[in-house]
Amino acid sequence: MRRPMPPLAELALVRTKEFVREPEAVFWVLVFPLILAVGLGLAFRSRPPDRIPVAVAEGPGAGAAAAALSRSPALAVSTLSPGDGREALRTGRIALLVEPGPPPTYRLDPTRPDARAARLEVDDALQRAAGRTDPLRPREEPVTEPGARYIDFLLPGLLGLNLMGTGMWGLGFTVVTARTKKLLKRLVATPMRKRDYLLALVLARLVFLVAEVTALVGFGWLAFGVAVRGPFVALALAILAGTFAFAGLGLLVAARARTVEGVSGLMNVVMLPMWLLSGTFFSYERFPEAARPWIRLLPLTALNDALRAVMTEGHGLGGVLPELVLLCVWAAVSFGLALRLFRWS
Amino acid sequence: MPYHPPVREAAIRCRGLRKSYGDVRAVDGLDLEVARGECFGLLGPNGAGKTTTIEILEGLTGADGGEVEVLGSTWHDGGSRLRERLGISLQETQLAEKLTVEETLLLFRSFYPQGRDPEEVVAALSLGEKRHARVGKLSGGQRQRLAVACALVGDPELLFLDEPTTGLDPQSRRELWAVVERFKASGGTVLLTTHYMEEAERLCDRVAIVDHGRVIALGTPDELVARLHAPHVLEFQTDPPLPPSLLRSLPGVAEEHVNGSSTALAVRSLAETVPALLASADAAGARLVSLATHRATLEDLFVALTGRHLRDA
Ligand SMILES: Nc1ncnc2c1ncn2[C@@H]1O[C@H](COP(=O)(O)OP(=O)(O)OP(=O)(O)O)[C@@H](O)[C@H]1O
Ligand SMILES: [Mg+2]
């Protein structure tokens, strides 16, 4: 048998082994975020802009009108009986119904976002077919800005969210399970330093972290071409700071809970607001201006902002310093409080 | 100057220990003194306060009142220096199931600046075959041995064992007894709790019988049994049963307990009572179905002291 290492190292090693031997945990940490990224990536993949569905009501002149509309690349045209056409309009399957004239009637619901665009396109197509000549024929130059797609926005947020989830659940469950099994009580019956136990949990997180981050960032790059535009050091430091912050919070939330149900409830109370507010799925700029300074103080907001700044905007360490400092404060305060409040039996 | 006889140094000393949980007085003014090198047993029924007492002594639970001194220091000034000298096995710890025996022992060994070679401890507890097995896959007896191994791996001076053999088969129980005896032979002090009087009689130099958070009897197992007026027990069944008044009139009977169809008599001397019993059964026209005798045990003492049985009190 080998010689024992120092307590902190033994504790971290043991925790790592326990994690690896827990297939469900590996699934939630590594596989689940990938599935989420694939699902969301597919839903929001970039594709040519959708054609707007419009219809022509059957009647004299319908054929000519339909032919004129079909020449527009922005429209998807069908021909329907007048009754079916109104039905389709009412249920939103088409944005606009043309009842051929003369003069033609456009039926549309102006509160629908694509109705205005449909009206412009339809009108252009019909006017031109009727012989209108445009005095100006501007050239179009399509531009796609790299890093401006939804997936570019989403992926750093998913990474942040995943770091929060695995950090908090991972540590919280470990601690509460050990407490209910009286393992914590057995450990404090030894000369083990309490700080070492908690630190080891945080350190063991770092081991899985590498796998977790590589999986998500690598996948985003390979599948969607989401590149890391800033320096890797800045990315690594942001991830580290975030991990420590959420490990600390996880320990704090689990500091006194006696049951897994109890800690789950608390976890949700702490994490749910951040799911909503911290700009993972949509930007927190949508919230009222007065609320934003507070939202920016949340650790997940700081982490998401830092990750986006580095990954999509290409900022270096200097650009994300305030966020990193904020995360470190969260980490230090929550770890310190957790150590104080911790219930060992 | 008054003469003070030299006192043997105590490993554990506590006075007036008290601890309540709400209305429940778990420990209610308990005094205890365990000498170095001694194996001391706390014997008592469920809920007597054994675990609460031992965990207060271990510094894991705070007492409401009373003084505790372990290996010459209190938990206020002892702290982790004191922990290095103790080995502890709790009543209901479940060690991490995903770790192996070897990993668990290495972990516990790492906490102690000085300790025993885990290899040697594994061998001493006959866990060699199982060293690479996960804790979750061990039998109850093997887990219990591992718990004791974790208590021994820091090479303690004082070993606390809370019900080390509860739920074990007789074979595993004897193996654990041997481990405790070896520890004692090497000069260690042991405080253990148990429901089993065979265990107390076999292992313990002295025993305290605890009930409702107090010590109700204290002494060597032999002393305690000798304290009974009637150190023998006579158990028999007759058909039909004999009336209690008849039993009480037999010579040398201190007490009688009727337990269903069988009767137990606590008697001063078998030679005095057995012939009289046979004669009166004959005279009453009752047929003797069974007859057995044994020397009184701590269990009988407990029954005599409290009127209840240890196991189902
Ligand atoms: N944490 C606790 N909260 C509330 N009551 C408790 C607690 N621990 C013990 N008690 C109560 O204190 C009394 C003594 O319990 P203790 O565990 O010390 O008994 P014990 O002698 O070890 O019993 P056993 O033989 O069943 O292990 C019991 O009535 C028990 O219900
Ligand atoms: Mg107990």
Image (cartoon, coloured by chain):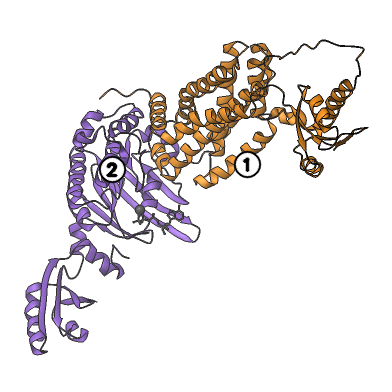
Viewer-nearest residue: A244 or B293: A244
Res. B137 image quadrant? top left
> Is B217 on the left or on the right of B281, as rendered?
right
Query: What residue is disc 2 on?
Result: B143
Viewer-nearest residue: A36 or B15: A36
Chain assignment, label 1: A
Query: What residue is disc 1 on?
Result: A269
How far apart are labels 2 and 1 at the CA level?
A: 38 Å
As displayed, is residue B290 above or below residue A146? below
- What shade has chain B been given? purple
The amino acid marked with disc number 1 is Val
User: Horizontal and vertical percent for residue B35?
Assistant: 27, 45
> Is A102 on the left or on the right of A188, as rendered?
right
Disc 2 residue: CB within 8 Å of ligand 2: no
Viewer-nearest residue: B132 or A199: B132
The amino acid marked with disc number 2 is Arg
User: Horizontal and vertical percent for residue A112?
Assistant: 82, 35
> Is B202 on the left or on the right of A195, as rendered?
left
User: Horizontal and vertical percent for residue B243?
Assistant: 20, 86
**Is there a contact, CB below 8 Å, between mark 2 and mark 1?**
no
Where, quadrant-wise, is the C terminus of chain A in this rendering?
top left
Which secondary structure, mark 2? helix
As drawn, the label of residue B141 is none
* Residue ID at (40%, 47%): B56
Which secondary structure, mark 1? helix
> In the image, which lettered chain appears orange?
A
